[in-house]
Image (spheres, grey):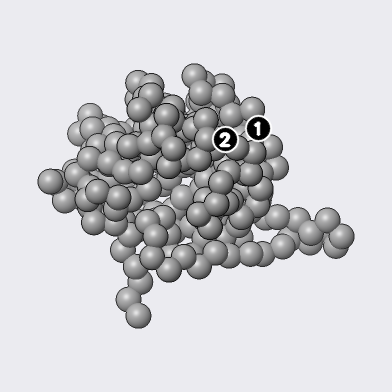
Amino acid sequence: MTPWEIHGTELTNCNCAYGCPCQFNALPTHGTCEAAICFHVDKGHHGETSLDGLNFAAVVKWPGAIHLGEGRMQIVIDEAASPDQRKALERIMRGEDTDEMATMWWVYSMMSPHKEETIFKKFDYSCDVEARTGAVQIDGVLDLDAGPIINPVTGQPHRVRIDMVGGFGYEIAEMGSATTRTHGLIDLPNNTDSYAQFNELHFNNHGYIRAAA
C-alpha cells in the first residue's frame, strides 16, 4: 500500500434537504442520492508524488441510499496534474491504497459499480469553510455555487454545524445551500437550493486524521 495524505477542503452539493439524512444514518430526502463532491488539496502526497494545489471531484448518482449500491460515478481530476498526480488521485478516489471503509472515497467507489471513464478538466475552485461560501467550475462538467442558508424571515445567514464523532467524512462540517448545473455524462437535475457541505479535509490511508485533543 502506497502511503498518502491529503489536507485541504471539501465543497459538496447533494439533492437532499439541508442537513442531509446521510449524516444521521437516515434515507435520502427524495429517495435518490445525487451529488457533486469537490475537493482542493492544500498540501498532500501519494508516496513521493506531491499533490499540493490540485483539485479533484466526482459526480455521483445512486438510485436509492448510498449503502444500497448500484451507483454511477465519474471522477474528474485537475488537468494541471501530471501523469503521476493523475494516477495518484484516481487511486485515492477509487479507494485504492486505503483501508477498508476508512474514507468516504472508498465507500463511494465500492457503492458505484457503474464508473464512467475518469476525465481531466480545467478547474476553478473556491471554498471558505467559515463563511460558508464557495464555487466550483469544471469545464464541460459542472458549475456549483454555494452560500449560507438564509433565514426566510430575517433574510440573514443562518449558521448550523455538524460535529461528527467518529465516522469517515469530517470532524466539523458547516451547512449551507447550493445549486449545481451539470453539463457532462451524469446529470444532476435536482440539485437546486439544496444541501451544501463545507469542511476541512484531512485524510490518509487509514482514514480521517483528527485534531489532537
In depth, the one of 89 and 185 nearer the eye is 185
Q: Which residue is drawn at the image coordinates 85% and 62% (left, top)? A: 154
In depth, the one of 3 and 133 nearer the eye is 3
Disc 1: which residue? 190
Disc 2: which residue? 32
In depth, the one of 49 and 208 nearer the eye is 208
The amino acid type found where label 2 is placed reads Thr
Horizontal side of 117 relative to 24 (left or right) equals left
Locate residue 45, reporting x and y percent. Answer: 23, 49
Look at discs 1 and 2 and give the one toward the viewer.
2
Locate residue 5, reporting x and y percent. Answer: 25, 54
Q: Is residue 103 above or below residue 68?
A: below
Q: Which residue is drawn at the image coordinates 87% and 60% (left, top)? A: 153
The amino acid type found where label 1 is placed reads Asn
Q: Earlier in the sequence, mark 1 or mark 2?
A: 2
Mark 2 surroundings within 10 Å by alpha-carbon count, few (fewer than 14), some (14 through 19), many (20 or more): some
What number of labels is visible? 2
* Label 2 residue SS: loop
Horizontal side of 151 relative to 18 (left or right) equals right
Asked if marks 1 and 2 touch (Cβ < 8 Å), the reply is yes
Residue 45 seen anywhere in this rendered image of the structure: no
